[in-house]
Image (tube, helix red, strand yellow):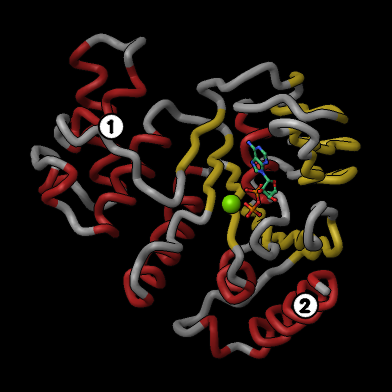
């Protein structure tokens, strides 16, 4: 995934103009777990919507898997802060939803496989409202992964979860990333989450968002990675830059 000179200016009603992103150059290699961190309003969701193909940027070029982005596609899966599951469909049907190109048996097999991966095999026949918030978000991740995207895009996916569930989901996402080999682009406003998850940490300044830090990170994955000195130093480095760029 490569962004070159990408900028976004929203033009609202009348003369209201918002400069959301300014001149972003960013390449994410296949297999990376890239975390984009920045204060609220720094254009993180805008960046994700551009890579997802939901909006065409005002300026610059976007290339995914070697081709210019012209809209959404099955090569990119998206997960939002809210699970956005269809309440009238079972969890299994929600996961099958993105697989309309396949025949019934293949859809079912693929959905079962994904539900197994996220630990929802036993709750496949429940409706979303019968699941906890964390389980709903697992279902949303399974749905996004089901078509086998090369890139998984997540926009603050754990921000609405309680602290313990959030930590669990972070571990699970790291594990999923390892087994699937999917490139991950993960958006958060939490510096801790960025330092914990990323093999690559990109920080955006306050609006209009520009890249103020691009850091490779390789934390030791011990029993308590958050206690490792590498975690603390990475987090402090990111925090310092995000703070000074937010002023
Ligand atoms: N569709 C839109 N129309 C006008 N302004 C928008 C739109 N979407 C976002 N913005 C503005 O662009 C800026 C960046 O928004 P966003 O990308 O959502 O930031 P973040 O996700 O980092 O909080 C904000 O000031 C926001 O109000
Ligand atoms: Mg956002």
Q: Decide which of 243, 102 is in the foreground and name it.
A: 243
243 shown above or below 139: below
The residue carrying mark 1 is 95
- Residue drawn at x 68%, y 69% is 218
- Residue drawn at x 39%, y 60% is 172
The residue carrying mark 2 is 243
| Label 1 SS | helix
Query: Percent position (x, y) of residue 86?
Result: 25, 33
Quadrant holding the N terminus? top right
Instruction: Identify the mark nearer the N-term, 2 or 1.
Output: 1
Quadrant holding the C terminus? bottom right
136 shown above or below 3: below
How far apart, in angstroms, are the residues tagged by discs 2 and 1?
Answer: 39 Å
Query: Percent position (x, y) of residue 188?
Result: 58, 60
Query: Percent position (x, y) of residue 13?
Result: 69, 31
- Residue drawn at x 27%, y 50% is 136
**Label 2, ligand 1: CB separation under 8 Å:** no
Which numbered circle lies on residue 40? none
What is the crowding at mark 1: few (fewer than 14 residues within 10 Å), some, or many (at least 20)?
Answer: many
What is the crowding at mark 2: few (fewer than 14 residues within 10 Å), some, or many (at least 20)?
Answer: few
């Amino acid at each position: 995934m490569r962004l070159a000179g990408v900028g976004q200016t929203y033009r609202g009603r009348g003369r209201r103009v918002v400069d959301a992103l300014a001149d972003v150059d960013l390449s994410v290699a296949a297999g990376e777990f890239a975390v984009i961190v920045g204060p609220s309003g720094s254009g993180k969701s805008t960046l994700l919507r551009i890579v997802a193909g939901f909006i065409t940027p005002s300026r610059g070029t976007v290339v995914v898997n070697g081709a210019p982005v012209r809209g959404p596609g099955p090569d990119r899966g998206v997960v939002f802060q809210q699970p956005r599951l269809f309440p009238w469909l079972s969890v299994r049907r929600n996961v099958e939803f993105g697989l309309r190109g396949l025949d019934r048996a293949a859809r079912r097999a693929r959905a079962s496989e994904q539900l197994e991966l996220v630990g929802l095999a036993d709750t496949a026949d429940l409706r979303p409202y019968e699941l906890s918030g964390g389980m709903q978000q697992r279902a949303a991740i399974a749905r996004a992964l089901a078509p086998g995207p090369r890139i998984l895009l997540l926009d603050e996916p754990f921000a609405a979860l309680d602290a313990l569930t959030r930590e669990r989901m972070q571990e699970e996402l790291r594990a999923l990333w390892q087994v699937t080999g999917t490139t991950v682009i993960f958006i958060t406003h939490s510096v801790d989450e960025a330092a914990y998850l990323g093999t690559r940490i990109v920080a955006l300044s306050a609006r209009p968002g520009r890249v103020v830090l691009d850091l490779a990170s390789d934390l030791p994955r011990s029993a308590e990675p958050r206690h490792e000195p590498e975690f603390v130093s990475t987090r402090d480095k990111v925090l310092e830059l995000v703070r000074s760029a937010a002023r």
